[in-house]
Amino acid sequence: MKHLAIDIGGSFVKSGIINGSELVKDRLVVKTPESYEKLIAYIAEISNRAAADSVCLAIPGVYDKVNDRMLFSPNLAYLTDKSIKTDLAASGVSVLIENDANLATLGEYMYGYETPPDTMILLTLGTGVGGGIIQNGKLLTGGVTSTELGHMTLVAEGRVCGCGKRGCVEKYCSVSSILHDYHEASGDPNPKTVREVVKLYEANDFAAFAAIDLFTLHISHAMSSLINIFVPQSIRIGGGLSEISDYFIPQAREMVDQMVFPAFRGLTDIAAAKHRNDAALLGAAEWAKINMR
């Protein structure tokens, strides 16, 4: 069967065809339309052109599947309060909808392991922090899409997050957190990218060491909390910051083993994700297959 997967991001919309057991084909990447109406029109256009057996959308935010209502989309605000499924049906397109980080988790789970574990967690670290959970071989979700791992409280009364809360994981384990900590340690408003911080780290810059070490400490605490709750066999790190995983994962493994509940030490493998750019597309196709059985 042929499945059309569409990953809607704040900057780009990615789409691809998954045909049978083949991975992403006819992959397209376009800038995210500037209005909801134009986004719906674009999805309808590529869906009708693909003539696929299913269409599944990976969306950034929390979606109420029962009432077809986008409850909150912090990085693409025009989706909030919209009835995406109903609006696409008016154009003759029937879709499945699931959170993008959840579908990325499913994609990594299905295609990132020779033998998938029973329980795994994907953390996507980039501009924001997201993630998903596989429990007993199944994606953890419900009538309202879950989970918002980036909005667990990491620091009580900490930095103000874009969601309105204080102290979220996202404010301490993202691109902006590394830059914030570098600027605070150095007093210098530059650099502007994490890659520049890494170059300074390689040059033994003190502020770069401080920023990367703080990031590593915070992500280790976040992973330890998740391990204490779910005891996953595997945690995979995706998102843009997975590109610098060699600079924090080895130390994070050691730190996590000191932080977790003693009985859980050594039970969770922590590694960079194998599928990064296409994980949500692969997961969207898998979600379609699951829901068509």
Image: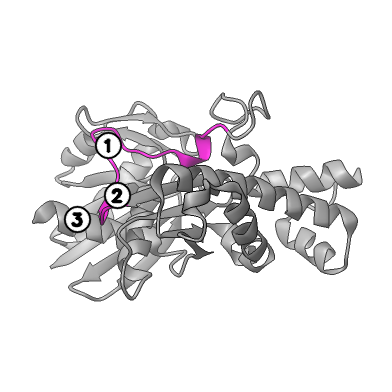
Q: Residue at x 51, y 61 (%)?
A: 266
On the picture, is 157 further left or further right than 265?
right
Could you tell me if the residues under marks 1 and 2 are in contact, i.e. CB atoms within 8 Å?
A: yes
Residue 189 showing in the rendered view:
yes
Work out how far the residue at label 3 is from the one at label 1, CA to CA, in angstroms.
Answer: 17 Å
Q: Residue at x 47, y 41 (%)?
A: 149
Query: Residue 58 at what x, y percent from top left?
Result: 34, 49
Q: Give the number of callouts.
A: 3
Q: Main secondary structure of the magenta part?
A: loop
Residue type, label 3: Ala
- Vertically, is 40 above or below 204? above
Nearer-the-camera pick, 223 or 239: 223
| Label annotation for residue 57 | 2
| Label annotation for residue 288 | 3
Could you tell me if the residues under marks 2 and 3 are in contact, i.e. CB atoms within 8 Å?
A: no
| Label annotation for residue 214 | none
| Label annotation for residue 84 | 1
Work out how far the residue at label 2 is from the one at label 3, CA to CA, in angstroms.
Answer: 10 Å
Judged from the image, the secondary structure of the residue bearing numbered disc 3 is: helix
- Vertically, is 23 above or below 72? below
Residue 188 showing in the rendered view:
no
Query: Residue 126 at what x, y percent from top left?
Result: 58, 51
Q: Earlier in the sequence, mark 2 or mark 3?
A: 2
On the picture, is 228 further left or further right than 280?
right
Q: Which residues are magenta?
A: 135-153
